Image (tube, grey):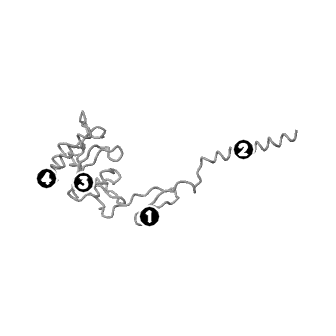
Amino acid sequence: MNTCRQPVSLVFLALLFAVALCASCGKKEESDAEPKMQNGSAGSSQPTGKKDKLKAPARGPNEPDRVTLKLLVLPCEGGRLGLVEPRPTSFEARALAASLKTSLETSDDVSAEFDTLALQYSADPDVKTSKGIRTLTNWGVEPDTDNHERARAAMPAIADQAFKMPVGSIAIIDLDEKMNPLGIVLVFRSK
């Protein structure tokens, strides 16, 4: 009878060890965890192995601290702004944006013409008071909320284009569920 107990206790120990081993399989050790990224020198990202927040992406070499824009948001299916029913398709809104852009590019006073078109077409509820003007701050620059500045991350698709645009230029930003959910946006960089 003694010989029967010994294999049972070995089987029990082996089973206990297997359960403990399986329980630890789903857990990652700190050293096995995926490393977090942080900005290193010269704008490169390097893993730190720490559980710190991700830092802002590196700025482009010629990007200013701030850009001032005028926005004209055209409502379309899938966009968040605009009470027009039925809403135009994104294709129709894009065609209108292209037509407005062509008209603006031939205007003697683009800024004044943009204001007129924004009042006529924009779905932005603040256009009557702000004329669609927005100031965005670049990565690493704190927005002055008293002057209604917004961080670059607040309008990513618009900001990504705007910080590359020369002053006085016009661009069209397409509808994008994550990056630009507003609608089709006509952007004029005024400063």
Identity of the residue furthest to the right in this view: 1
Q: Which is closer to the viewer, label 1 or label 3?
A: 1
Alpha carbons under labels 2 and 1: distance apart: 46 Å
Task: Name the quadrant containing residue 120.
Answer: top left
Alpha carbons under labels 3 and 4: distance apart: 19 Å
Q: Are marks 1 and 3 in contact (CB under 8 Å)?
A: no
In primary-sequence order, the first of circles 2 and 3 is 2
Reading the image, the residue beneath label 3 is 69
Relative to 78, 16 lies left or right: right
Q: Position of residue 124 (x, y in %)?
A: 25, 44
Does residue 89 sit above or below 131 in this rendering? above
Q: Residue at x 28, y 53 (%)?
A: 148
In primary-sequence order, the first of circles 1 and 4 is 1
Q: Amino acid at mark 2?
A: Leu
Q: Residue at x 74, y 45 (%)?
A: 14
Q: Which is closer to the viewer, label 1 or label 4?
A: 4
Reading the image, the residue beneath label 4 is 106
Q: Which is closer to the viewer, label 2 or label 3?
A: 2
Identity of the residue furthest to the top in this view: 86
Badge 2: residue crowd in 10 Å (few <14, some 14–19, many ≥20): few
In primary-sequence order, the first of circles 2 and 1 is 2
Q: Are marks 3 and 4 in contact (CB under 8 Å)?
A: no
Q: Residue at x 51, y 56 (%)?
A: 35
Reading the image, the residue beneath label 2 is 16
Alpha carbons under labels 1 and 3: distance apart: 31 Å
Residue 17 is marked as none
Q: Amino acid at mark 4?
A: Thr
Reading the image, the residue beneath label 1 is 40
Q: Amino acid at mark 1?
A: Gly
In primary-sequence order, the first of circles 3 and 4 is 3
- As helix, strand or loop, the secondary structure at mark 1 comes to loop
